[in-house]
Every structure is written in structure tokens, then in C-alpha cells.
Image (cartoon, rainbow, N blue to C red):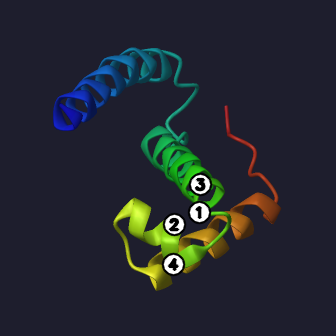
Amino acid sequence: MVDNKISDYYKHVEVKLEDIVDKLLKSKVNDHDNILLNVQNLIENVFIKSAMRLSDNNVSKASKLLGINRNTLSKKIREAEDRKHRPQKRSKR
């Protein structure tokens, strides 16, 4: 029963993502936009924030929820913080 529910979640996410991706690709401003990388970073950050919240900010527990190594998660958290504090590049039109 649990496996079916998880499978349903994945299907639901896939359908929603396809719709979002279509809209993003159609609205691409210029060739300098790296839509795939931006979306990957966004999704990764959402998963990391949720895992950290669910684990009460315990990196070891969060890494187990995500199925990644603790050191990898720590690195990804640092990289996300660096991106957050780095000045945004303006897109060339």
C-alpha cells in the first residue's frame, strides 16, 4: 500500500513538473538562461530544507532521509548558502 502511494506521488510530481517545464522553456528570455541548472538547484534546495526541518536540523538524519552521504549534504548546504549570498548576474538581452 505504501509503495503504491509513493508511486502515485512520483506520478503526480512528474505531471506537474512537465507543465512547469513547458511554461519555463516557452518563456526562456535568452540563450544565457540556464533553466535546467536553476530548476535543479531549486528542487534540491526544497528537498534539503524539508529534510532538515523534518530531522530538526540534524544533518545525519536529513542525509538518511535524502539517501545521500552526510558529507555530501553538508557540502550542498554550504554551496546553497554561497549561492544565496553571491550577487545575481544580470541576464544579457
User: Which callout, 3 or 2, points at the residue further toward the start of the chain?
Assistant: 3
Q: Gap between marks 2 and 1, in whole Å?
A: 6 Å
Which quadrant would residue 3 be assigned to in this image? top left
Farthest residue, direction front = 1
* Residues packed near mark 1 inside 10 Å, few (<14), some (14 to 19) or many (20 plus): some
Q: Secondary structure at mark 1?
A: loop
Instruction: Check disc 2 and report the residue beneath it.
Output: 62
User: Which callout, 2 or 1, points at the residue further toward the start of the chain?
Assistant: 1
Q: Gap between marks 3 and 4, in whole Å?
A: 12 Å
* Residues packed near mark 2 inside 10 Å, few (<14), some (14 to 19) or many (20 plus): many
* Residues packed near mark 4 inside 10 Å, few (<14), some (14 to 19) or many (20 plus): some
Question: What amino acid is labelled 2 in the image?
Answer: Ala
Q: Are marks 1 and 3 in contact (CB under 8 Å)?
A: yes
Q: Residue at x 46, y 48 (%)?
A: 40
Instruction: Check disc 4 and report the residue beneath it.
Output: 60
For the residue pair 63 and 3, the one nearer the viewer reads as 3
Q: Gap between marks 1 and 3, in whole Å?
A: 4 Å
Q: Are marks 2 and 4 in contact (CB under 8 Å)?
A: yes
Q: Is residue 89 left or right of residue 71?
A: right
Q: Secondary structure at mark 3?
A: helix
Q: Is residue 92 left or right of residue 43?
A: right
Which of the image's four quarters has the N terminus?
A: top left
Q: Is residue 30 above or below residue 90?
A: above
Picture coordinates of residue 60, whole percent (x, y) = 51, 78
Picture coordinates of residue 45, whole percent (x, y) = 58, 52
Q: Secondary structure at mark 4?
A: helix
Question: Number of marks in the image?
Answer: 4
Q: Residue at x 69, y 40 (%)?
A: 91
Instruction: Check disc 3 and report the residue beneath it.
Output: 54
